[in-house]
Image (cartoon, helix red, strand yellow):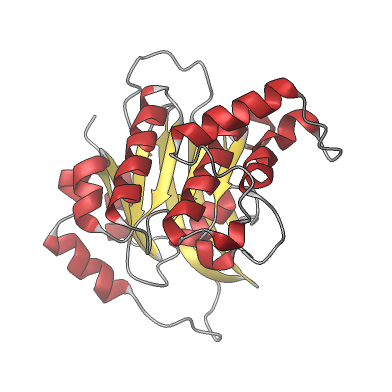
Amino acid sequence: MSTIQNPSGSPERPDIELHDLTLGYERHPAVHHLSLKLPPGSLVAVVGPNGAGKSTLLKALAGQLNPIGGHISGLGSQQRVACLPQRSGIDRSFPISVEELALLGLWHEVGALGRYNAGHRRDCHAALAAVGLLGFEKRAIDTLSGGQFQRALFARLILQDAPVVLLDEPFAAIDQRTTADLLALLHLWHAQRKTVVAVLHDLAQVREHFPHTLMLAREPVAWGRTADVVTANHWARALQLQEPFDDGAGPCGAPSTGAAMRTAHGLPA
């Protein structure tokens, strides 16, 4: 099992561990035999071709998809998870203001009744200021640009204040300034020892901002330091492994020797 070294050496929160994890839909595997360990404070990019199982992996980490095989430890009731789905899956026509959207991040404190006090609203305004949206509190979300809407979603993540943050293509189709501001927020979370896992497509962005990377193509292609993972050879291997979803696929068998070796030795000790 691969692991990232704990930056501080003090595991005050449990490691997130994936044990021979296989994921899929209606028993058809989408991610095969993935094993790795993430200590608190990890900042990890997940990359791979379209259909490689990246979003499927995030759904499993968020508790939205049960494994076909193997298991995940260190999540669930042990530590809260904040998840940002792809923007294409969010209904922006819902009649809600920017402030109301951000305040949803306090669900873990206020519950279904949503009775926000003055302190909650102060925290909300501070979160909106942190993402550059102070003064937008009463704006309807359907009037926002793509970048502004993504900033509002990040304000909600700030208020969730979860130790684990999962992001599915957080910088897709937004402007460069917004991307830079939100990347700075990710680095702040990393400094605060939050565990951040992000699905990304921009490999240059991954090289610059993410110290560790998992490359998937249904099975783990490479895992470890980004400079060692994001290479032309690994990307060619990922494209080679990419194949259409097969409705006639049989049961998922044991991992190949190559896949097992890539998983076991993706990171240096």
Residue 164 in the image, given as x and y percentages of width and height: 52, 35
> In the rendered image, which quarter is residue 114 located in?
top right
Q: Is residue 196 visible?
A: yes
Residue at the right extreme, as displayed: 113
- The vertical placement of 11 against 146, above or below, is above
- The vertical placement of 37 against 8, above or below, is below
> In the rendered image, which quarter is residue 36 located in?
top left
Residue 146 in the image, given as x and y percentages of width and height: 45, 61
Residue at the left extreme, as displayed: 232
- Residue situated in front as seen by the camera: 207 or 112: 112
Q: Is residue 252 visible?
A: no
- Residue situated in front as seen by the camera: 118 or 26: 118
Left or right of residue 211, residue 104 in this image? right
Residue appearing at x 65%, y 73% in the figure: 26
Left or right of residue 22, residue 172 in this image? left
- The vertical placement of 86 against 223, above or below, is below
Residue appearing at x 35%, y 49% in the figure: 178
- The vertical placement of 29 against 178, above or below, is below
- Residue situated in front as seen by the camera: 98 or 214: 98
Residue 122 in the image, given as x and y percentages of width and height: 63, 24
Quarter holding the C terminus is top left
Residue appearing at x 61%, y 25% in the figure: 123
Quarter holding the N terminus is top left
Residue 71 in the image, given as x and y percentages of width and height: 58, 46
